[in-house]
Image (cartoon, rainbow, N blue to C red):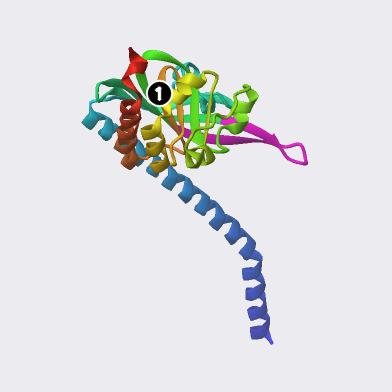
Amino acid sequence: MALRFLRFEGRATFHGMGGEVFVVGFLVLVVVLVVLGVLAERKRREALRRLAGRLGFRFRQERDRGLASECAFLDRLRRGSNRYAFNIMEGEYRGSPVLVFDYHYETYSTDSKGRSRTHHHYLCCYLMRLPKRFPELTVAREGLLSKIAQAFGYDDIDFESHEFSRKFCVRSKDKRFAYDFCHARMMEYLLANPDLSIEVEGNALAFVFSGRLKPGTVEGNLQRLAEVRALMPEYLFE
């Protein structure tokens, strides 16, 4: 009898500790995930730093709200609040000044119980300075910038290529510039690179992607930025 009682007590004690063990295990898992995230971010930043050195670019990891404010003319960089650029790479690529950086902004929501929640969003931007200023132009996959452009009263411009017009949304208040920019070779290039969204405004030519910079794709995107610049007709710069 005593032995059976002790076994029962042992099982009861173990069952009572199960909840505490689960909570402790969950907290340990959270800490491990946070540490792994910090280490991965540090590894990514150092890879970007090495890449910047190899390309001859300057690198700054600090948050730069001033740069975020300067680039707010780009549609996708004027959303939300607490906006800042970081992991900034700056230099010259194929004869043109370029900026490459991570970008952060916040939005907020409230649940049914009135509790506020902060949402962190990350983008990465590739920007090339042009030797001349141009009207605002956006070229993106259909639906990506439609709502933003509609708010500014821009019409979707159609082109002779039905495939291009179906897949891409082109908007500009200067239709002549839009047609000059989106000539046959440019449309062919964009159809072969459907992940690109292009913005031109003032003396800036920019790509903006969702997510943070990936060291392995930076050079490829810089090359595509230079290729889009090279496809712009030279008479536009005369």
**Residue 115 forms part of the magenta stretch:** yes
Q: Is residue 149 above or below residue 219?
A: above
Rendering coords of residue 75 (x, y %):
53, 25
Assign the C terminus to one quadrant of the image.
top left
Foreground: 228 or 53? 228
Q: Which residue is mark 1?
A: 205
Q: Residue at x 55, y 38 (%)?
A: 142
Left or right, 40 with reference to 142? left
Identify the residue at the far bottom of this view: 1
Q: Which residues are magenta?
A: 106-124
Q: Residue at x 46, y 34 (%)?
A: 197
**Can residue 116 be spotted in the picture?**
no
Q: Residue at x 47, y 24 (%)?
A: 178
Q: Secondary structure at mark 1?
A: strand
**Can residue 126 be spotted in the picture?**
yes
Q: How many marks?
A: 1
Q: Is residue 82 above or below residue 193?
A: above
Identify the residue at the far right of this view: 113
Rendering coords of residue 126 (x, y %):
39, 29
Q: Is residue 116 above or below residue 155?
A: below
Foreground: 35 or 166? 166
**Residue 51 forms part of the magenta stretch:** no
Specify few, some or many for label 1: CA neighbours under 10 Å numbering under 14, 14-19, or 20 or more. Answer: many
Rendering coords of residue 199 (x, y %):
46, 26
The rendered magenta stretch, by its main secondary structure, is classed as strand
Identify the residue at the far front of this view: 160
Left or right, 220 with reference to 105? left
Amino acid of disc 1: Leu
